Amino acid sequence: VINTPARVAPETAARVQQAIDRLGYRPNVYAQGLMTRRSHLLGLLLPDIHGEFYSELLRGADMEARQAGLHVLVSSDAGRSDSPDDAGFFNSNIVGMLAGLAVMITEPNAALVRQLERLHLPLVVIDKDLTGPRTDRVLVDNGSGAREATEALLRTMNTADVFFLGGPEENFDTSERGRAFIDTLSSRGAGIGPGQVQYGTYDVEWGFAAGKALLSARKGYRTGVLAGNDEIAVGVLQAAASLGVSVPRELQIIGFDDTRIASMVRPQLSAVHVPMSEVGAGAVRLLLQRIQSPGSPGKTVTLPTKLVLRGTTAD
Amino acid sequence: VINTPARVAPETAARVQQAIDRLGYRPNVYAQGLMTRRSHLLGLLLPDIHGEFYSELLRGADMEARQAGLHVLVSSDAGRSDSPDDAGFFNSNIVGMLAGLAVMITEPNAALVRQLERLHLPLVVIDKDLTGPRTDRVLVDNGSGAREATEALLRTMNTADVFFLGGPEENFDTSERGRAFIDTLSSRGAGIGPGQVQYGTYDVEWGFAAGKALLSARKGYRTGVLAGNDEIAVGVLQAAASLGVSVPRELQIIGFDDTRIASMVRPQLSAVHVPMSEVGAGAVRLLLQRIQSPGSPGKTVTLPTKLVLRGTTAD
DNA sequence: GTGAAAGCGCTAACAT
DNA sequence: ATGTTAGCGCTTTCAC
């Protein structure tokens, strides 16, 4: 009655259904799994579980998975378990319950890649262009976004007046964004001055410190900043406020990601929009396809970014 | 060798271990589960999966679970599946894999409560004081926080000059916070004027709209606002900026939750701190205890709140 | 210290 | 249209 309703007489089905309800019968998922080898659980391994960015990504993944009747198990253990006997994600029995795994890799992590390789699980990599024969990828078009933002800054400023304040130098996104910034300047025949491209951490504190140092050194000059993410941009914005530098008149700032934070600060942050929930949803979509046809060649989906101009930029 | 290493000779164990490595043997979790009836999966059912608040809660839960060697499965399906044949969380086979479930209930939801009752699973309820005999609860001390905040406002303002702009009226937290606000005023012998307590939604937009209306109506008067959460407070802050009302001189604002957003805006938001990650961690802790001793009486943990004064309040 | 066997609850294949 | 049976891979118990 449960598995092949078509094969059973309606009257019998009704009687059986009644018994099911009366007894509170629930199929045992373990026995089911033992037979079918089918799983309804997708793993999502993130560098961190917190903050607007990952939270939105997770939401996108969850929505997409739910539509397919699957569930998402998040873990932020990625790469933390360097030693093989560590009780990390890869050694936990949960791995055996997963139908597939989406991993976000934001910086070089040989140990993690090695673990993934010997997993023999449908795999989708987010962010890092890990080249496996049957691994799919979800990428974000950092280059276009950073280029567009840099050009927006250069419409009203000289190449010597714009700065990139990124996150960690090893971070794939930051490094792509930084490179696009540099390329945009180079394509106009400009060199990169000292301090014009700086790397730090993805938080308000670093943005504030770097912004303060930068603005102090540039008293009287108009300045443009492309930040590695929104939080850094907010830090720079705070630095400007604390130094009495007017935004966007004296200082223009463009953030990256366009999280909800961008519209919570004043002036509202101009930012390169990254479709975070689409990243999560896309990863799940690719994973589902791969589970369906495990042998197909690795696909790469690159999601577009888009500059959103708000109050921290001006013509 | 895997299950009872003590019972096997070291030399044999080594040989077996070698074979395990060579063959890449991994115990089948389903077969294991079939025998042991043990699970390493905890469910976490949230009203929403997104935003600083839930994301921090999830992180706390995840950290605590990981320490115990368990994993957390989040779902934001809560209560959405009203019809019994809906493919919602409760009808998914995943429920059978859970060792326990933590549910956050933020407003009355009879359907959800009914579903939970017939689940026969170790249960922890977050936020709503659902009274089941063997159900544990994690509560936040909204009353103290709201009282403390209201009193802070009243140190420099009259009872007629302070306002509560909450989230949805049905929301348990908002209603507790609002009640404490009213009680604090009442305890000083003051009545509640029209519009002095307002309910809306938990977002910046509503805070902005309500703030604008309020401030327009109170031109020339000093005003104090206790917001239902940080986002509403940010909305009010933006309303003040757009009307040229000086904060904290003419308008004082206190947010609720103290998410990271509070320190990202300028001036930085004074707010009642809610230990979000502790809520998640506490729920998992209670759940683990209940799994250990399913028969024990329901425990309630009430987590303290604390007023954090920043730039939107003044003496 | 090691091996053997029963059986967990289900699905799939086959027999009726 | 319905009933029967083997066996998924493990743990547990018992025999050696």
Image (cartoon, coloured by chain):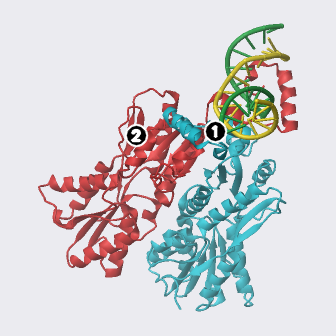
Chain colours: A red, B cyan, C green, D yellow
Disc 2 is placed on an element classified as strand
Circle 1 sits on which residue? B29
Circle 2 sits on which residue? A137
Name above or below for residue A247 compared with residue B118: below
Identified at 27% across, 56% down, the residue is A178
Residue A278 visible in rendering: no
Q: From the viewer's perspective, tell me whether residue B119 is left or right of residue B11.
A: right
Q: Give the class, few, some or many, for how many residues have Cα within 10 Å of label 1's Cα (few <14, many ≥20).
A: some
Identified at 36% across, 64% down, the residue is A201
Question: How many angstroms separate mark 2 from mark 1 (CA)?
Answer: 28 Å
Name above or below for residue C1 compared with residue A34: below
Q: From the viewer's perspective, tell me whether residue A106 is left or right of residue B92.
A: left
Name the disc covering residue B154, or none: none
What amino acid does circle 2 point to? Answer: Arg
Q: Nearer the viewer, residue B5 or B119?
A: B5
Q: Nearer the viewer, residue B138 or A88?
A: A88
Residue B281 pos. (x, y %) = 63, 63
Identified at 63% across, 38% down, the residue is B29
